[in-house]
């Protein structure tokens, strides 16, 4: 089975914050877990793909780049997007289809925006998805804490299905590249 790790918006300024925005919730744990799963992806011979949001740091400079503490392999593919959805206006879907990817592990920022839309879009486009429960983050909103947002999405997205393909939420320490979707079909 061909698999890919999709790391969304794990950019320097988004994770660390700036003069107008705070850092994301549990940023050090997020970075540690992304690196852990990157290593698991390499062991599983899965493709590693990064998506960067052009709105972060005005789409340029160090703040726009993937966070400096993330171990990026030269073989990793990087797509830039202008919308909340990683599949909109990018070559991501074609790239995944061309590589015959069947299973995606998704991580990154921000939970209620780009992570949510990527997980849902992937499942309707023919991929089984594993969302790393402790591998995505966000900031507090005016109504909910970041922790509440993350917990809500982990619960709402676990088992989310589109008939043929669906989403499971698992911890980063699990063997994410040994998908368990077939146990539930």
Image (spheres, helix red, strand yellow):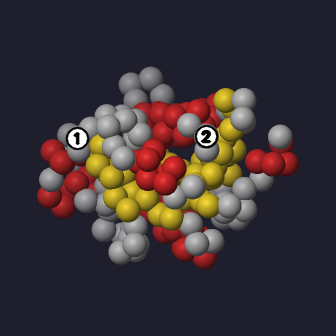
> Residue placed farthest to the front in the image?
98
Regarding residue 168, the answer to whether it shows in the image is yes
Q: Position of residue 79 (x, y in %)?
A: 33, 52
Would you say the residues marked 1 and 2 are in contact, meaning their CB atoms lie under 8 Å apart? no
Residue positioned 18% across, 48% down in the render: 59
> Residue placed farthest to the top in the image?
143
Task: State the residue in front, 154 or 27.
Answer: 154
Is residue 145 depicted above or below 183 in this figure?
above
Q: Position of residue 175 (x, y in %)?
A: 70, 64
Reading the image, the residue beneath label 2 is 126
* Dot 2 alpha-carbon crowd within 10 angstroms: few under 14, some 14 to 19, many 20 or more: some
Quadrant in which the C terminus is drawn: top right
| Secondary element at tag 1 | loop
Reading the image, the residue beneath label 1 is 55
Residue positioned 56% across, 66% down in the render: 46
Count of marks placed on residues: 2
Question: How far apart, in angstroms, are the residues tagged by discs 1 and 2?
Answer: 28 Å
Quadrant in which the N terminus is drawn: bottom right
* Dot 1 alpha-carbon crowd within 10 angstroms: few under 14, some 14 to 19, many 20 or more: some
Regarding residue 133, the answer to whether it shows in the image is no
């Amino acid at each position: 089975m061909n698999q890919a790790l999709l790391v969304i918006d794990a950019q320097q300024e988004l994770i660390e914050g700036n003069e107008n925005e705070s850092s994301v919730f549990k940023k050090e744990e997020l970075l540690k877990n992304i690196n852990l799963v990157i290593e698991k992806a390499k062991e599983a011979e899965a493709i590693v793909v990064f998506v960067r949001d052009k709105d972060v740091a005005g789409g340029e400079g160090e703040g726009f780049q993937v966070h400096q503490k993330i171990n990026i392999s030269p073989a990793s593919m990087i797509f830039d997007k202008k919308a909340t959805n990683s599949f909109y206006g990018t070559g991501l879907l074609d790239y995944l289809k061309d590589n015959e990817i069947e299973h995606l592990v998704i991580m990154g920022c921000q939970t209620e925006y780009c992570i949510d839309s990527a997980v849902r879009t992937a499942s309707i486009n023919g991929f089984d998805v594993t969302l790393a429960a402790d591998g995505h983050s966000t900031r507090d909103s005016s109504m909910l804490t970041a922790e509440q947002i993350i917990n809500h999405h982990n619960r709402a997205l676990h088992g989310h299905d589109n008939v043929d393909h669906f989403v499971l939420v698992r911890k980063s320490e699990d063997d994410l590249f040994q998908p368990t979707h077939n146990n539930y079909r």
